[in-house]
Image (cartoon, rainbow, N blue to C red):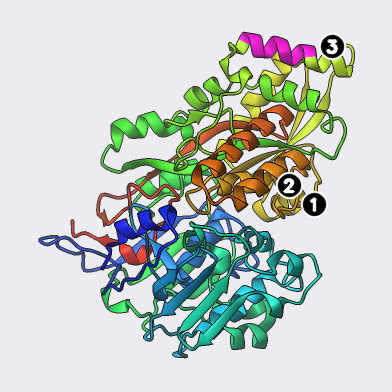
Amino acid sequence: MKTAKTLAASLVSAAILSSFTTASFAADVPAGVKLAPVQELVRGNGTEPASLDPHKTEGVPESNVIRELLEGLVNQDGDGNLVPGVAESWETEDNLTFVFHLRKDAKWSNGDALTAHDFEYSFKRAVDPKTAAPYSWYLEMTTMVNAADIINGKKDASELAVKALDDYTLEIKLEQALPYFVAMTSHTTLKPVHKATVEKFGDKWTLPANFVGNGAYKVSEWVVNEKIVMERNENYWDNDKTVINKVTYLPIENQVTDMNRFLAGEIDMTYEMANEHFKRMQKEQPDSLKVTPYLCSYYYGFNNKKAPFDDVRVRKALSYAIDRDAVAKFIVGKGELPAYNFAHQKVAGLQVDTPDYATWSQKERNAKAAELLAEVGYGKDKPLEFTLLYNTSENHKKIAIAVASMWKKTLGVKVNLENQEWKTFLDNRRNGNYDVTRAGWCGDYNEASTFLSLMQSNNGNNDQFYNSPAYDGFMNAAMSAVDDAVRGDNYRQAEAQLAQDMPLAPIYHYVNARLVKPTVGGYPMNNAEDKIYTKDLYIIAK
């Protein structure tokens, strides 16, 4: 029998059969800890979720809520290692065909048995163009057989190579060997949905009165722009090990408001930290401030299909003129790392070449930026003017103001700042209704492709509309590589291509800082994907 930690290692190192079972991965309350009589948790969530349908979402706030309501084949523990979810065990001999064995005590919240047929239905729904899932491309990245052709309308969704061999055995076939495929199945898009409920209620299946899930919690109340309340799902297979009875998510977009409500005792866990208050909180709330690695990159994306941003000289000029050290140290200032490549520096096994401009002084970058922009015809007599789009957030606003000031001072550029609420922002970014946009990307799993696949021309979330045959070639070679060294070398060349073409301007690599009450037990300090399951937490008596 393998432990969870050793299993995670085996998944990325070899095409090997792996199988184990476990009694529980829910809250692990240490001996001697006295639990509070009231087990309720209130979490800030950054914004109002666009949807609770896992096949209609693409953002972190949505995933945070869906993670409570729906459980996929595998979960993660506090260190980011894979642990069983609905699947008790799985096996593969070639990293092409995977067989998952589902637990027989898994149920939906209405008491229906959860079977392999539910996963087959859900995966085919996610990839079906009729669903219009914004993350359907993710299934193409898994290389499930026929996924790409289905997404492109060349084949029917029924031809996706996922099959329920019986009620509790699920087989998935890939076109390319992926040693990290099991890790990919923890993603929100691969959560199951209840077929009868979806087909009965259509888009309204996510309303509290209709929702049927299989997670540790079920939604009991959803007041738009105010709160989402969830209570224990008595039909969850590990409900006996769950401690917190009720969790409430608040869509607070203003980080200062989030912080003040925490300090007032109204919130147990903030979504993130107001940058300008970080140092004060370090002094005043040292027991509450939690800073952890966070597998996300913050960047500005250029609309590569729109003039003048279709000219690489403009993109490079704007990127070079961003003083990343100043942004990381003085604007965000929580330990973030200045970024000159897209994939987060802490991605497991990633090795990239340092781009030339990263070795220059900021003065040298600024001089080169002015030179490039002048070549295109912009200068004091003809200043470049454009709109910088960002989603509503005080932190994003402060960064936008700072970067716009850098561009103004260095290049004479006139920047109009425009903020939009989350859903509108996503729609406009996806449809190319912007010049330059704020963006962030968080790894869906801990491997370089989770970042670098985003810039492939066939990726549905390639909102910069970057199209480079050379880049696609490196990524395709990486995805088909059997040898880890070959795969890594292609990732290295892909990053170098991005530095050459600059479809986006990397700014910093994240850490995650938030306020968490000391009475919240089980908070994970080493999950770089920030996957926090309320079922694993507990409230300690004061």
Residue 260 to residue 108: above or below: above
Give the secondary structure at mark 3: loop
Q: Amino acid at mark 2?
A: Asp
Position of residue 439 measured from the top left corner of the image (x, y, whole percent)? 64, 42
Foreground pick, 261 / 461 = 461
Residue 216 shows in the view:
no
Distance CA(mark 3)–CA(mark 2): 31 Å
Horizontal arrangement in the rendering, residue 385 relative to residue 53 (left or right): right
Distance CA(mark 3)–CA(mark 1): 32 Å
Label 1: few (<14), some (14–19) or many (≥20) C-alpha neighbours in 10 Å: few
The secondary structure that dominates the magenta segment is helix
**At x 49% / y 78%, what residue is drawn?**
213
Question: Mark 3 highlights which residue?
Answer: 380
Numbered label attached to residue 431: 1
Asked if labels 1 and 3 touch by Cβ distance under 8 angstroms, the answer is no
Place residue 488 in its image quadrant. top right
Of badges 1 and 2, the one in the foreground is: 2
Place residue 383 in its image quadrant. top right
Position of residue 458 measured from the top left corner of the image (x, y, whole percent)? 74, 53
Q: Earlier in the sequence, mark 3 or mark 1?
A: 3
Asked if labels 2 and 1 touch by Cβ distance under 8 angstroms, the answer is no
Residue 255 shows in the view:
yes
The magenta stretch spans which residues?
Answer: 363-371
Q: Amino acid at mark 3?
A: Lys
**At x 26% / y 74%, what residue is drawn?**
23
Numbered label attached to residue 463: 2
Position of residue 470 measured from the top left corner of the image (x, y, whole percent)? 74, 39
Distance CA(mark 1)–CA(mark 2): 8 Å
